[in-house]
């Protein structure tokens, strides 16, 4: 009897009832636009920004239309110049190099290590070779590099850091919230991230000039005084006329859906940790499968799980994916030559004219990924781990049998 998993890797939890009620109230009064307020009313969006700033400990917060928008807005707010190089991880998601290109920059990719974080030696080499001033650091799939060492290196190289925290909302390095090391940090509240408003995002910063520019860029017109988690009026005086409007505001409907999710984030992070550790335990000591080590300094959000099949041939990985797929376990493979459903490989982003990066190629070749939505129970995760483990072993045995057969045939031919 072979067991089959029947759950969905893409099914998230429902919006909390409190969020549904708040959303209905916004729909009933009709003031969805964040600057459309009744006398004395504080918009849901302004309250959300205040609450997200408090959650992260940042001075300022701006809610926007998407995570990708937040990244582009951050680049413009820190003063990206046309054609300027922007360093970023070679293993990230398409919105990251996309935001750099859309803001007029030139993505320059930096190698990643087999633990899926930025390679500091290559970062230094690329920074020196290009003279870049900006690093857009992507905490891809929630893996944090040594943030203290990175910030020291960036200070030495004169690099300003914009953090892409799409997968690290709720995470921390040595107790410092992810997003609190760089000059600006960007988050996504798209359905597959750690808060769900369909689409949406945040920028946080302690820098008054950067945040004033971000607010005007996002389409505040001259209504920025209605923001609460915002710098004082003087910060806007200096920049309000020279900063273009690139509309990408959040609306009160999404903000209403998100506000109750702030208080539940810590509880959800704890449930993700339980699922992650269940998967890690289920896959431990599987011959041929490498788990990604997680440093003690990192408190991560286990909303997805990665492992690698180092040294496996494409054919062997394809056979493994076909077998797990047939048993209801949909895995993603970052090593496929052609992008399937998503892209996370630098060499697929040809508009950025990427240079070959042999180390990243090797890492991605054997890298497998899956989501762990909170609709999974620990028992579901244990079952998925049993299936993955069994199929890793089965493919290995099939290959050994084939090799033994070849060896026997060779002996006969002798
Ligand atoms: C999802 C994601 C983004 C952008 O988020 P959107 O809200 O979809 O624009 C940026 N970076 C990474 C790594 C992501 O996974």
Image: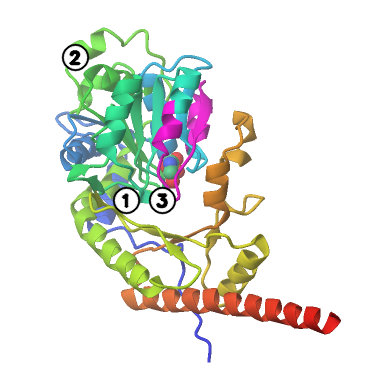
Residue labelled with disc 3: 115
Measure the alpha-carbon separation of dots 3 and 1: 26 Å
Residue labelled with disc 2: 233
Please provide the residue range marked out in magenta.
Answer: 96-124
Q: Are marks 2 and 1 in contact (CB under 8 Å)?
A: no
Mark nearer the N terminus (3 vs 1): 3
Element class at badge 3: loop
Residue at image coords 84%, 80%? 414
Mark nearer the N terminus (2 vs 1): 1
Marker disc for residue 134: none
Element class at badge 1: loop
Measure the alpha-carbon separation of dots 2 and 1: 31 Å
Of labels 2 and 3, the one closer to you: 3
Which picture quadrant has residue 251?
top left
User: Where in the figure is residue 24, as x and y percent of width and height?
Assistant: 29, 51
Residue at image coords 57%, 46%? 361
Q: Are marks 3 and 1 in contact (CB under 8 Å)?
A: no
Is the residue 82 above or below the residue 55 in the image?
above
User: Where in the figure is residue 216, as x and y percent of width and height?
Assistant: 33, 19
The answer to whether residue 62 shows anywhere in this view is no
Judged from this view, the residue extending furthest toward the bottom is 1
Q: Is residue 108 magenta?
A: yes
User: In the shown orientation, is residue 390 left or right of residue 16?
Assistant: right
Measure the alpha-carbon separation of dots 2 and 3: 44 Å
- In front: 155, or 344? 155
């Amino acid at each position: 009897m072979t067991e089959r998993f029947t759950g969905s890797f893409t099914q998230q939890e429902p919006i909390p009832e409190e969020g549904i009620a708040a959303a209905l109230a916004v729909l009933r009064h009709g003031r969805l636009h964040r600057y459309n307020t009744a006398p004395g009313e504080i918009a849901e969006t302004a309250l959300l920004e205040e609450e997200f700033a408090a959650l992260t400990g940042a001075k300022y917060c701006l809610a926007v239309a998407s995570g990708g928008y937040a990244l582009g807005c951050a680049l413009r707010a820190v003063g990206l110049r046309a054609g300027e190089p922007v360093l970023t991880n070679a293993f990230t998601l398409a919105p990251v190099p996309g935001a750099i290109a859309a803001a007029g920059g030139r993505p320059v990719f930096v190698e990643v290590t087999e633990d899926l974080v930025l390679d500091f030696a290559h970062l230094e080499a690329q920074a020196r070779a290009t003279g870049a001033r900006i690093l857009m650091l992507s905490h891809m799939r929630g893996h944090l590099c040594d943030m203290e060492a990175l910030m020291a290196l960036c200070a030495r190289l004169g690099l300003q850091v914009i953090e892409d925290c799409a997968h690290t909302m709720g995470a921390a390095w040595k107790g410092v919230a992810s997003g609190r090391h760089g000059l600006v940090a960007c988050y996504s509240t798209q359905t597959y991230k750690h808060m769900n408003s369909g689409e949406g995002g945040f920028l946080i910063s302690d820098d008054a000039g950067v945040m004033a520019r971000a607010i005007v860029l996002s389409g505040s017109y001259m209504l920025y005084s209605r923001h609460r988690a915002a710098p004082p009026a003087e910060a806007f005086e200096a920049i309000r006329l020279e900063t273009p409007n690139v509309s990408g505001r959040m609306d009160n409907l999404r903000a209403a859906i998100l506000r109750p999710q702030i208080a539940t984030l810590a509880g959800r992070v704890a449930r993700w940790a339980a699922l992650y550790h269940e998967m890690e335990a289920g896959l431990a000591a599987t011959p041929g499968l490498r788990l990604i080590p997680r440093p003690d300094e990192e408190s991560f959000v286990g909303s997805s799980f990665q492992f690698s099949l180092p040294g496996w041939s494409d054919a062997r990985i394809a056979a493994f994916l076909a077998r797990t797929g047939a048993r209801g376990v949909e895995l993603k493979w970052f090593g496929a030559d052609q992008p399937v459903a998503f892209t996370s490989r630098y060499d697929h982003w040809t508009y950025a004219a990427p240079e070959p990066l042999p180390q990243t190629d090797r890492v991605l070749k054997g890298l497998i990924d899956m989501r762990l939505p909170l609709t999974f129970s620990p028992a579901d995760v244990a079952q998925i781990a049993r299936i993955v483990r069994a199929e890793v072993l089965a493919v290995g045995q099939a290959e050994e049998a084939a090799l033994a057969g070849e060896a026997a045939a060779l002996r006969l031919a002798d």
